[in-house]
Image (tube, grey):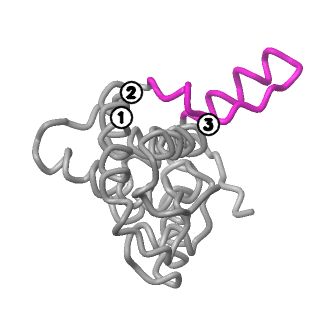
Amino acid sequence: MRHARRNETPAEDAALLAEWMELYGGDVIRLAYSYVHNFHKAEDIAQDVFLRAWQHYGEFQGQSSIKTWLLSITANRARDVLRSGAERREFADEGEAFAREIEPCDPADLVADKLARDAVWRAIRVLPETYREVMELYYGNDLTTHEVAEILGIRDQTVRTRLHRGRQMLERALAEQGGMGVDHA
């Protein structure tokens, strides 16, 4: 991944943007979706994120990775969309396209896995925003606690604390729904 500053040729600028989109597009859309719960809105946010990142690349300090920088822009942009009232949270389950599929051999296992995964994500979506946001970034985007801290502008220890408390809330919520436990691995 090149970290060269802009002011290259227009073709090189376009190639850099295309590279970012290919490498991080799925992560950006997944994160945007975790906020707005609408695939089309998430795509719109992703387009806006890449445009803004490309326009402001000269301001990128290099203190974090490009991925972390893009996800930070995504989180901020998605919050802006929600605050503006442009998008009301919808909890319809259109997120299956973003779920990591584990393909069991037995169709009954596939159904059971999907039901369990859906129950967990539904429970995460109703957590208080402070905990939901950290859990969606950490688990939904497979980020480290350090990357989550950079994206949210908080300390690593705060992320770990919120993950711990969020998992406790999640475990209680799932237990109330039918005795499902949470693996803390």
Instruction: Mark 2 or mark 3: name the one nearer the start of the chain.
Output: 2
* 94 relative position to 38: left or right: right
Tell me, yes or no, whether the highlighted magenta stretch contains residue 106: yes
Q: Which residues are magenta?
A: 94-118
Which residue is disc 3 drawn over?
117
Name the residue located 46 percent from the left edge and 63 percent from the top edge.
5
Secondary structure at badge 1 equals helix
Q: Nearer the viewer, residue 164 or 77?
A: 77
Q: Nearer the viewer, mark 2 or mark 3?
A: 2
Secondary structure at badge 3 equals helix
Measured as percent of width and height from the top left, residue 89 is found at 25, 37
Identified by mark 2, the residue type is Phe
Measured as percent of width and height from the top left, residue 161 is found at 50, 78
Q: Are marks 2 and 1 in contact (CB under 8 Å)?
A: yes
CA gap between label 1 and label 3 equals: 21 Å
* 147 relative position to 126: left or right: right
Measured as percent of width and height from the top left, residue 63 is found at 49, 78
Q: Is residue 141 above or below residue 46?
A: below
Which residue is disc 1 drawn over?
42
Which label was assigned to residue 39? 2
User: Residue lying furthest front in this view?
Assistant: 9
Instruction: Mark 1 or mark 3: name the one nearer the start of the chain.
Output: 1
Identified by mark 1, the residue type is Ala
**Quarter of the figure that contains the N terminus:** bottom right
Q: Are marks 2 and 3 in contact (CB under 8 Å)?
A: no
CA gap between label 2 and label 1 equals: 5 Å
Identified by mark 3, the residue type is Arg
